[in-house]
């Protein structure tokens, strides 16, 4: 690989008082993160509440990003659905417009499924996409999906679809797994989702990150994702974030660093964290970073 993946911000999604996506606010946040050194933005991932955003909304947001001058080549699109047909439809729309990658999670409604079953689901998605299938980053997030992508399953996908499956985002938070993934699959773009392990993973060959923390401190996360530099502040703050529901906590911190309360809203079934929780996070952030500036 001649060029590392770098840092993609797992862009949070702002909602207005009617529960609609505040697209202009979202685009402004994307521009801030790109200006601060992110190489791309990831839309509709976990931090972006992608599972709560329907197809028509996705298409409106995506079109608005392109109209705003954010190049499709700087956009990654998350696909977090259960039906292979729906996954193919969402991926097809994004790939047809030239996005950089698709971040593709396994189906998550059915639990305790076999590696063979998960393999067949991915194969079905790729078959429906046909010649459009490319640049797939498979997404290991077992804490939410309850469907782990084993190292052997990833190897099987890579062997069967060498021109399609090009990377893995590992958000397991399980360092021994991450380490084994890096050792076994150096031919893949390995992205470390847990910032506490990010710098160490990059030093072992990781290609970067799709990071929720990049919404808050993009310049600092970039040094971890691109140069493998340890940052105890970020590692410490992630530990604080994990004391709260993660997505509402990240959005509370975006509200803190931007002074825009619109970021506090989340879409049901998620609920915003308490005012007390927000204050505790803000205090911890300011103590560690000594500034509200991202």
Image (tube, grey):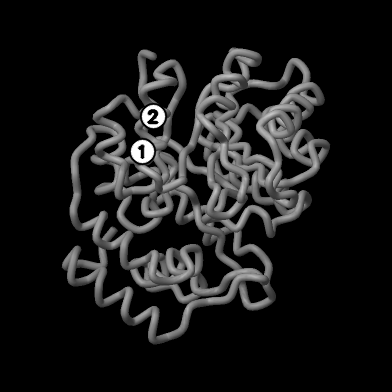
Q: Dot 2, crowdedness within 10 Å: few (<14), some or many (≥20)?
A: few
Percent across and percent down for residue 92 are 74, 31
Question: Which residue position is annotated with label 2?
Answer: 180
Residue 176's disc number:
1
Q: Foreground residue, 174 or 29?
A: 174
Residue extending farthest to the bottom is 276
How many C-alpha atoms fall within 10 Å of the one at disc 1: few (<14), some, or many (≥20)? few
Q: Secondary structure at mark 2?
A: helix
Q: Tell me where residue 101 appears, x and y as whole percent.
A: 57, 30
- Cα distance between the residues tagged 1 and 2: 6 Å
Across and down, in percent, residue 43 comes to 57, 46
Residue 200: quarter of image: top left
Q: Is residue 178 above or below residue 269?
A: above
| Relative to 42, 224 lies left or right | left
Q: Any mark on residue 109, and which?
A: none
Residues tagged 1 and 2 counted as in contact (Cβ below 8 A): yes
Quarter of the image with the C terminus is: bottom left
Residue for point 60% across, 33% down:
102
Which image quarter: residue 90? top right
Residue at 35% over, 32% down:
179
- Side (left or right) of 277 relative to 131: left
Q: Secondary structure at mark 1?
A: helix
In the displayed structure image, the side of residue 256 where residue 81 appears, left or right: right
Query: Which residue is painted at 19% across and 63% down in the image?
Result: 289
């Amino acid at each position: 690989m001649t060029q590392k993946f770098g840092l993609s911000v797992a862009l949070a999604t702002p909602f207005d008082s009617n529960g609609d996506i505040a697209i202009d606010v979202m685009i402004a946040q994307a521009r801030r993160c790109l200006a601060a050194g992110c190489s791309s933005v990831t839309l509709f991932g976990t931090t972006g509440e992608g599972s709560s955003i329907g197809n028509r909304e996705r298409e409106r947001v995506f079109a608005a990003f392109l109209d705003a001058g954010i190049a499709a080549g700087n956009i990654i699109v998350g696909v977090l659905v259960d039906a292979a047909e729906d996954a193919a439809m969402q991926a097809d729309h994004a790939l047809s417009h030239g996005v950089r990658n698709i971040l593709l999670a396994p189906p998550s409604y059915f639990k305790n499924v076999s590696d063979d079953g998960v393999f067949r689901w991915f194969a079905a998605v790729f078959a429906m996409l046909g010649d459009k299938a490319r640049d797939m980053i498979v997404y290991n997030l077992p804490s939410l999906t309850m469907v782990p992508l084993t190292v052997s399953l990833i190897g099987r996908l890579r062997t069967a679809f060498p021109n399609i499956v090009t990377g893995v985002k590992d958000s397991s938070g399980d360092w021994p797994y991450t380490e084994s993934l890096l050792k076994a699959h150096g031919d893949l773009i390995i992205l470390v989702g847990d910032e506490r392990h990010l710098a160490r993973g990059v030093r072992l060959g990781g290609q970067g990150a799709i990071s929720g923390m990049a919404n808050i401190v993009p310049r600092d996360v970039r040094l971890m994702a691109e140069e493998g530099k340890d940052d105890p502040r970020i590692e410490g703050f992630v530990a604080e974030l994990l004391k709260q529901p993660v997505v509402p906590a990240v959005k509370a911190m975006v509200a803190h660093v931007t002074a825009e309360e619109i970021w506090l809203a989340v879409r049901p079934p998620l609920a915003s964290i308490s005012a007390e929780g927000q204050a505790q996070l803000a205090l911890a952030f300011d103590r560690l970073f000594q500034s509200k500036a991202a």
